[in-house]
């Protein structure tokens, strides 16, 4: 039975489906087989690629360099700049090679600076980094300029700060005070702490690239410096410039520290105003302490004559009262003149005296309690009236036995409350009221300062200050110069109103005062230091004993050394002399004193600079330095002072290496902040550094800090600016990498011909020459920011942005037509890299050494072992070419306008090559542009052509976008479609309005009364020239406006 057509059709479709199914299976099998082959091939290729990458990575990786040896560089420059890789090894080699060591017997002229010795108390902050960056820039430049450059490193023992840190550590770790240990063991603990932590600063300085002469490293309490300080004291004492006296402000700082610290003449005291009753947190007290209150109480009058009420803000000091004063003209108390009051707690008789100087009858009750041992004004009154001086505080701020058994041993502010309660019990308390007052707080500990009677040593500063003042003001060329000059006025103000300098400090850490008190057997009073004429001074106890035996011949006596130490500034004030070996007559002292420049922050102009000058002249016979260069103070990006409690104090290494926000927090937690301060500080860090601080490297940090010095008296440091310079280092790296790629293995000779070399090569050498001259001039005048800006601008805007781009076509292939240009570009690149890196080196020492060492050696050019010891570039007259520079300026202006025009009008066609036109009003301009068609097309990029048109011979091109270059030149870009004339007209009108305003302002200035008589001719000429250019520009815009109006009407 035959199949029906429908059955045949179904059968046919079924067979076709079967064939399709088989075909799909076959294709799938083939595809799988092919995939397996490809997979095997990929695995093999991946293995080969991985092996190739490993091989390439080895080429880019620096070989291991043994410590102190010259860095071994990778075979191929890495593709990207990595500061941690670049900066390793170089410093160790520099130091080991002795590049930083000065020679006292050298015939080179000396250049000497001293590193202001950082406090040994911990790590450097960005203020120290600024000092290091500025000074290292100066010393590297001078070293490269042929000077016998000496930069002396040192550390300061920082008496107050170091003692506080160690005492806090003792309390935290052992719950012990310095008194628990005793003086000898405590000082031993401080030395131990110094040896453990002092090295951190030295490591930081090395990481900062500071090229210090480490062979002359010193510490203000090492053996040589200690000898010098003792000699300083002895000589000044013998010259009657040091004397002993009594009362001086002392900071009572107890609590966890159980110490008290001396404050000199109020200079380290912060004053706060209190309007009314207020409670403050005071170190060492669990409860807040009340201030801004005037407490009144009564003293009973002897003989039953009633009472006399006095008022005080420090009621606890009544325990040391020795008199009561009234005004002689105050009739309320006339009946009490010459009478006595009785002290309620000890029965002491207090005379009622008349004193018109001390007493203001309108204040309080008009009667004043007198505590001569604990108040400056009362001290003077006590002297006037020969009153008794009774000290009621111990050295750790507690009431002593003179205060009475009831209060003895109490901390002073606890005693304040106890005295009030005792007065109430005796019925003598008369109440308290709000009182506006000024409260003195120690700027270091935030503790309340107290006047306290103590034997103190002073330097008589009258004659010393006059010498220091004269050194800066005598004649047209004074011995001492200030940079910036405005600080001379501050110098005059300080030294013209100077007070004697208290050099005693009630501490255990520091140079112990080389003075001994002689207690005679027949002295009526045996208290230490009570007789000013019983002091002897010697370099040691034997000298002091001999002096006492001669002074008190035939008398029996004992001698005791003053327990106090000398003010830290007394030893650091001698630093320029002591670091060079004074008082010995050393080679260093003869060669390097006076030093050249003192560079430091303006905040210690008086504390340190003035004292160095006074002591240098007196003991060294000359000013200690010829120039004083004062840098701004570093603040945070918000302009706030750096403060641990704000969390904005930054370790330079945190910027160099980078750190996470968590790392910043951890550092705060390891410090001494209390919990509330810690919360505030962490919040500040989170706000300013939410992602931590990126790794920037030393070179970027240094360059940023030096660049900031143009700011006036403070630097608002934004870390993002440092990040920007780190990115710039990467651009510098890539520019040099491009240049290095053009030097083949056979490049060994420079054939320099200034006459025949290409235009761009002549230009880059001419502007390099100008950059060298400007940088050297700026460095000479201590304008470091301007010098840095000059070097940066040459590298960034001239070498990278213009020259490298201009010569790229020479290296695009082996075109024989460019053979000569290619050879000249090779030579020019080498010279630019060599000079440019040496020019930059003082600012960025690490990256410049790394790149300079990669330069291929060339015949006829002897390179030093290191860029550190190479010569700083000097200007070459043969390189200067003003004509070439003028022409390139015109080319750059033209290119800039063409790029701007393209970005503004043809942004959507930025990759399309468009024809351009240059419309010139002067033939000279047209000739320049015509002759530099190649450079314009190369630098402008994406131009198909540029046609030069001349006014008077050619018409401006129609249907183009327009941009004015200057009064003689305009450029046009042509697109396929017609340009929107209305949009172009709006742009032109806006520019015409701007020119009109400038023109009117300048005309008003020129036509002002007295302009021709008062304004210098050179400025008048410049104004006239500027006005002429504005008029010409206006004419050009007017013509272009007319042309567009005509186009619009078509």
Image: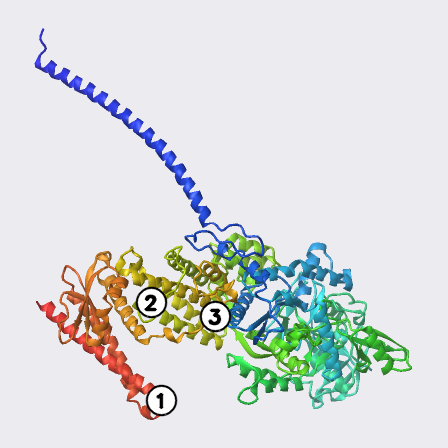
Q: Considering only vertical position in the picture, is 36 above or below 828?
A: above
Give the spatial CA distance, label 1 vs label 2. 39 Å
Tell me the tag on residue 1036: none
What kind of element bears circle 3? loop
Q: Looking at the image, is mark 1 or mark 2 earlier in the sequence?
A: 2
Q: Considering only vertical position in the picture, is 1006 above or below 857?
A: below
The front one of 206 and 335 is 206
Residue 916: which quarter of the image? bottom left
Give yes or no for contact between labels 3 and 2 (Cβ–Cβ under 8 Å). no
- Badge 1, how many Cα within 10 Å: few under 14, some, many 20+? few
- Image spot of residue 413 (x, y percent): 70, 67
Please say whether residue 965 is visible from this viewpoint.
yes
Of all residues shown, which one is farthest toward the top? 1
Q: Looking at the image, is mark 3 or mark 2 earlier in the sequence?
A: 2
Residue 407: which quarter of the image? bottom right
Q: Which residue is mark 3?
A: 872
Residue 930: which quarter of the image? bottom left
Q: Which residue is mark 2?
A: 761
């Amino acid at each position: 039975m035959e199949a029906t057509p429908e059955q045949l059709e179904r059968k046919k479709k079924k067979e076709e489906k079967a064939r399709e199914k088989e075909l799909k299976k076959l294709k799938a099998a083939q595809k799988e087989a092919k995939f397996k082959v490809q997979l095997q091939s990929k695995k093999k290729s991946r293995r080969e690629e991985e092996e190739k990458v490993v091989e390439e990575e080895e080429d880019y990786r620096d070989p291991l360099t043994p410590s102190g040896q010259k860095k071994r560089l990778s075979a191929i420059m890495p593709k990207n700049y990595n500061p941690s890789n670049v900066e390793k090894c170089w410093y160790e080699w520099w130091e080991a090679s002795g590049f930083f060591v000065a020679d006292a017997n050298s015939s080179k002229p000396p250049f000497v600076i001293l590193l202001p010795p950082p406090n040994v108390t911990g790590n450097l902050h960005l203020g120290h980094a600024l000092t290091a960056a500025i000074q290292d820039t100066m010393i590297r430049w001078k070293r490269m300029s042929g000077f016998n450059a000496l930069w002396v490193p040192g550390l300061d023992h920082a008496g107050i700060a170091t003692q506080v840190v160690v005492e806090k550590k003792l309390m935290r770790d052992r719950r012990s005070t310095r008194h628990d240990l005793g003086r000898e063991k405590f000082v031993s603990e401080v030395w131990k702490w110094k040896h453990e932590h002092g090295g951190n600063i030295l490591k930081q300085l090395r990481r900062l690239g500071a090229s210090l002469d480490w062979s002359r490293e010193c510490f203000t309490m090492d053996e040589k410096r200690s000898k010098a300080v003792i000699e300083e004291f002895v000589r000044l004492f013998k010259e009657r410039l040091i004397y002993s006296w009594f009362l001086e402000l002392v900071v009572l700082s107890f609590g966890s520290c159980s110490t008290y610290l001396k404050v000199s003449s109020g200079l380290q005291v912060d004053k706060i105003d209190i309007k009314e009753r207020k409670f403050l947190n005071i170190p060492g007290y669990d409860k807040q302490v009340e201030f801004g209150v005037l407490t009144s109480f009564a003293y009973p009058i002897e003989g039953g004559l009633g009472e006399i009420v006095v008022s005080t803000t420090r009621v606890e000091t009544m325990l040391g009262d020795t008199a009561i004063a009234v005004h002689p003209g105050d009739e309320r108390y006339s009946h009490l003149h010459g009478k006595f009051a009785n002290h309620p707690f000890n029965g002491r008789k207090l005379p009622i005296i008349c004193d018109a100087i001390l007493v203001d009858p309108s204040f309080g009750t008009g009667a004043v309690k007198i505590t001569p041992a604990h108040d400056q004004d009362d001290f003077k009154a006590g002297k006037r009236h020969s009153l008794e001086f009774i000290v009621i505080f111990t050295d750790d701020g507690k009431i002593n036995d003179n205060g009475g058994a009831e209060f003895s041993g109490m901390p002073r502010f606890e005693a304040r409350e106890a005295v009030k309660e005792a007065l109430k019990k005796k019925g003598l308390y008369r109440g308290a009221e709000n009182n506006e007052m000024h409260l003195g707080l120690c700027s270091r500990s935030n503790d309340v300062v107290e006047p306290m009677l103590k034997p103190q040593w002073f330097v008589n500063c009258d004659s010393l200050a006059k010498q220091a003042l004269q050194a800066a003001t005598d004649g047209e060329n004074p011995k001492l110069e200030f940079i910036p000059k405005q600080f001379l006025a501050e110098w005059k103000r300080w030294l013209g109103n100077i007070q004697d300098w208290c050099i005693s400090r009630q501490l255990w850490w520091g140079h112990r005062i080389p003075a001994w008190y002689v207690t005679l057997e027949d002295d009526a009073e045996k208290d230490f230091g009570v007789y000013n004429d019983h002091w002897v001074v010697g370099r040691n106890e034997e000298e002091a004993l001999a002096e006492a035996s001669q002074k008190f011949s035939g008398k029996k006596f004992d001698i005791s050394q003053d327990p106090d130490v000398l003010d830290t500034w007394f030893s650091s004030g001698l630093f320029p002399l002591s670091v060079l070996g004074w008082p010995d007559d050393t080679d260093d002292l003869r060669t390097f004193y006076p030093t050249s420049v003192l560079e430091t922050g303006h905040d210690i102009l008086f504390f340190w600079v003035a004292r160095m000058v006074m002591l240098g002249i007196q003991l060294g016979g000359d000013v200690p330095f010829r120039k004083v260069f004062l840098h701004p103070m570093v603040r945070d990006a918000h302009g706030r002072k750096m403060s641990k409690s704000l969390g904005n104090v930054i370790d330079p290494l945190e910027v160099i290496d980078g750190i996470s926000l968590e790392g910043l927090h951890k550092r705060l937690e390891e410090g001494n902040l209390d919990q509330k301060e810690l919360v505030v500080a962490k919040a500040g860090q989170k706000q300013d550094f939410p992602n931590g601080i990126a790794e920037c490297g030393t070179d970027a940090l240094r360059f940023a800090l030096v660049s900031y010095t143009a700011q006036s008296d403070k630097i608002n440091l934004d870390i993002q600016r440092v990040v920007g310079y780190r990115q710039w280092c990467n651009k510098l790296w890539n520019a040099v990498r491009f240049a290095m790629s053009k030097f083949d293995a056979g490049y060994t000779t420079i054939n320099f011909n200034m006459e025949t070399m290409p235009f761009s090569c002549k230009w880059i050498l001419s502007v390099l020459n100008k950059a060298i001259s400007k940088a050297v001039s700026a460095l000479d005048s201590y304008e470091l920011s301007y010098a840095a800006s000059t070097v940066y601008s040459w590298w960034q805007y001239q070498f990278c942005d213009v020259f490298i781009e201009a010569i790229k076509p020479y290296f695009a292939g082996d075109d024989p037509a460019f053979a000569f240009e290619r050879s000249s570009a090779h030579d020019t690149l080498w010279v630019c890299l060599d000079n440019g890196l040496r020019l930059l080196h003082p600012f960025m020492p690490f990256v410049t050494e790394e790149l300079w060492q990669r330069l291929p050696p060339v015949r006829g050019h002897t390179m030093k072992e290191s860029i550190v010891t190479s010569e700083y570039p000097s200007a070459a007259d043969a390189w200067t070419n003003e004509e070439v520079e003028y022409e390139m300026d015109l080319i750059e202006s033209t290119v800039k306008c063409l790029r701007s025009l393209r970005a503004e009008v043809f942004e959507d066609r930025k990759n399309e090559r468009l024809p351009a036109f240059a419309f010139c009003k002067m033939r000279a301009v047209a000739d320049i542009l015509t002759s530099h068609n190649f450079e314009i097309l190369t630098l402008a990029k994406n131009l198909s052509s540029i046609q030069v048109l001349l006014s008077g011979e050619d018409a401006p091109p129609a249907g183009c976008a327009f941009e004015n270059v200057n009064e003689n030149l305009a450029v046009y870009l042509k697109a396929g479609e017609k340009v929107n004339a209305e949009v172009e007209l709006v742009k032109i009108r806006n520019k015409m309005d701007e020119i009109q305003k400038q023109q009117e302002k300048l005309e008003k200035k020129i036509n002002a009364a007295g302009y021709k008589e008062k304004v210098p001719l050179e400025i008048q000429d410049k104004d006239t020239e500027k006005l002429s250019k504005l008029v010409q520009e206006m004419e050009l815009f007017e013509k272009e406006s007319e042309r567009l109006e005509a186009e619009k009407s078509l």
